[in-house]
Amino acid sequence: MSDFQYYQPQLFEAFIKASQYMVRLKTQQDMREHLSKLVMTFFAASWTAFAKRDEKGLIIIYDSSLSDKLTIQCLSAEDVNKTVADVLDSGFLATQVIAVPIPSMTVFLPVIEEYQTASVMLIGHQTASPVVSDLLNIYLAIAGLAGETSERLHNELELNRHRTQLEELVKERTAELTRVKHQNELILNSVGEGICGLDSDGRINFVNPSAAKMIGWKPEELIGLDGHATFHHSHSDGCAYPVEDCPVRLALKGASAKAVADENFFRKDGTRFPVEFTVTPIKEGSRELGAVLVFRDISERKQAEEELKRSNQKINEILDSIQEDFYVLDSTWKFIFASRTFTSKIGKEPADFVGHNIWQMFPKHIGTDYEKNLRDAMEKKEIRRFEIGGKYTNACYEMTVFPSQGQVIILGSDITDRKKAEESLENYANNLETANKELEAFSYSVSHDLKAPLRAMDSFSEILIEDYGDKIDETGRDYLNRIRKASQTMSQLINDMLKLSRIVRTEIQIDMVDLSEMVKSIANELQAAQPGRKVKFVIKPDILVNGDQGLLDICLKNLLENAWKFTANSTEAVIEFGAMQRDGQTVYFVKDNGIGFDMTYSDKLFHPFQRLHSGNEYPGTGIGLAIVQRIVRRHHGDIWGESEINKGTTFYFTIGNIAVDPPGN
Amino acid sequence: MTTDKYVLPVEDNPDDVILTQVAFRKAEIANPLQVTADGVAAMDFLFCRGRYAGRDPNDKPALILLDIKLPLINGVQVFQAIHENTDTSNIPVIVLTSSMEASDQRICNHLGVTNYLQKPASLSKFIEIVRDMKFEWLD
């Protein structure tokens, strides 16, 4: 020990300074360092060290002011450890002389933290003499200070750690909150519905972009405005909407959620739109914090509803206007729909039928063909068509039953008139056929019966002239000749009439007919019959047509015979046959340069037995053209003639498209 | 025996009967005419029954002139009867008629009528036909 004199005030002062300083220290290590410096400076300690038990329970030395080498060498001894252990366990100080390397009086001080000896401070004096008790007290005080400071520092550390942790937590939570807030904002902003937050006075404290857009304001403009006054102020007719009646206000006050459809909101520009909205009050306990208003613009929907109503109306109008019996039955035979025309037949409205079972309403139809057909259609899913005579009237109906998706649709058309018409047509046709047959038989027998007397007249006149000619004078013979001529004419007339009727009665057989060849052969015949006559024939070849060979032969024969006849007095007779196109149709013609006829009388041309020339000049009964016209008409064609007196005549005719038509046309 | 050859006209019209006779005379045909006025009489004659019951069946006409249009029985039926009976089927039959209807001709063709003539309206024509007949059937 040095010559240092310990005066208590000095020691005390030192202690105060030390403790003042200690308060400012931040780390344990600093504290130990400082204490070490303090003790070695003011109390002439030679060295300091600290010791504690580690996790394994072994004594360790740390923060020693000695060199590492010395610390390990001197302070790791068994006896040092033991002393440390004693101090740790008892909480009392101890002293011991340790060689460091020269003997040092070492004080072992307990450093108490939280009522426990946490560590031991070793203070070594390089002396063998014991440490003065005042100094020991000081040292104890210092150890106590150390303990408390350590505790304090510990707590501070702990506090800092907690604070940091808390800060971390707060940061995390804030981030989370921000994220959630952001997400909510996204949702609110992207939602199609308008979302509006109102405070308990009905002022807008939140509005999402959709809401603002729908009512034509900028979101920031709306905050703080009275919601009702801003966009819910009037009814659709323009009358003011008192806020007391407003369901939103009532919800705010009455505090139950309300859903409203069919009201109008108004935009900033004054226009309005139909909405449906819900208002939900926000409460905390019994405290009303306001409400959330969620609304939707239902203009489109309203429009669609209108259109649907209109189209339904249209459909109903159409259905109502159905003039037929039209009704629909479901799978249980109940009426789904019945047309007014149908229901009014028994003096009822369509509504009276809907939902009722048809078999219950009309039991008379059970067991009939009608029932069978309806059931067939429903079960077999086949369309059924049948006729029924009316049970309540004499009307006739054509029924069609359509199965469709478990229902049957029935359409009944009144065909009474049609049937009547069909019947009368059938009757008419039958009558016509009968008449035709009778006519045929008649004309057949008549011609027979007429011919016989004519034959007698002609023949007996001839015999008279031949056998009794010498007994009759010239006048008498002349008269007899006239009798003969007359009967011959009548015979010819009868033949012609038969010919004409035959044309009408014959069945047409359609073939490809070469008219040119036909004309050629007729021309040859005519020439052969009168070889003396010189007639030039100009025949266009390869004229083909679809028609009846026989009839067309007769037709052309007549035309050519006429041409031949009426060119009898021409010096250079020319008869032409050809075809040309007129208005997209083929027109055939027979042309001669003969005597011609007066066009004034051309309307009489085709009348049977009507002649435009006297019998003296040109013979004939006047049946030829009538026959020709009949034939052409049967071929669905037409015939007409053009002529100039002394220049010639041309007959034009067409042949139409013919299907086989029955005789009698 | 040419003089025994006779002709059987089956004709109901008395005028036509006379005309036939005149025509034969003018055609200088001496063969006698056995006229029957209807189909029943004709058949009675040919088959030797009825009013002609006592007649000799071998006594057959050389030629039959048959009118289609007859009272009582149709000329066609008469022809059929003649044609189907072996005794009479070899007698030549000329069917005479006013009708040139194709349907009648067809029916007759169908039945086997090979000679079908229209009654000519004029006597001279008739005489010509009769001459041909003589040439073909009676010589």
Image (cartoon, rainbow, N blue to C red):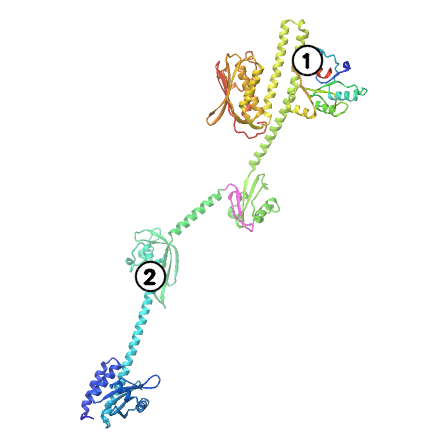
Residue located 58% across and 28% down the image = A509
Along the viewing direction, whichever of A659 and A408 lies nearer the viewer: A659
Instruction: Please state which amino acid type lies under the numbered disc 1.
Output: Ile
**Considering only vertical position in the picture, is A576 above or below A65?**
above
Gap in Å between the C-alphas at discs 1 and 2?
132 Å
Q: Chain of mark 2?
A: A
Q: Chain of mark 1?
A: B
Disc number at residue A546? Answer: none
Which residue is disc 2 drawn over? Answer: A185
Instruction: Please state which amino acid type lies under the numbered disc 2.
Output: Glu
- Residue B117 visible (yes or no): yes
Task: Determine whether, in the image, residue A311 is placed left or right of residue A336.
Answer: left
Tell me if residue A338 is in the magenta stretch.
Answer: yes
Quadrant of the rendered image containing residue A156: bottom left
Q: Secondary structure at mark 2?
A: helix
Could you say where residue A123 lies in the image, as x and y percent from the top left? 25, 89
Along the viewing direction, whichever of A528 and A580 lies nearer the viewer: A528
**Considering only vertical position in the picture, is A11 above or below A623?**
below
**Considering only vertical position in the picture, is A371 above or below A87?**
above
Along the viewing direction, whichever of A1 and A306 lies nearer the viewer: A1
Could you say where residue A651 lies in the image, as x and y percent from the top left? 50, 20
Q: Quadrant of the C terminus of chain A?
A: top right
Disc number at residue B127? Answer: 1
Residue located 19% across and 91% down the image = A8
Q: Secondary structure at mark 1?
A: helix
| Magenta residues (range) | A322-344
Residue farthest to the bottom, as pictured: A129
Could you say where residue A391 lies in the image, as x and y percent from the top left? 59, 42
Along the viewing direction, whichever of B1 and A196 lies nearer the viewer: B1
Mark 2 is surrounded, within 10 Å at the Cα level, by few (under 14), some (14 to 19) or many (20 or more) other residues, namely some
Task: Determine whether, in the image, residue A163 is placed left or right of residue A502.
Answer: left
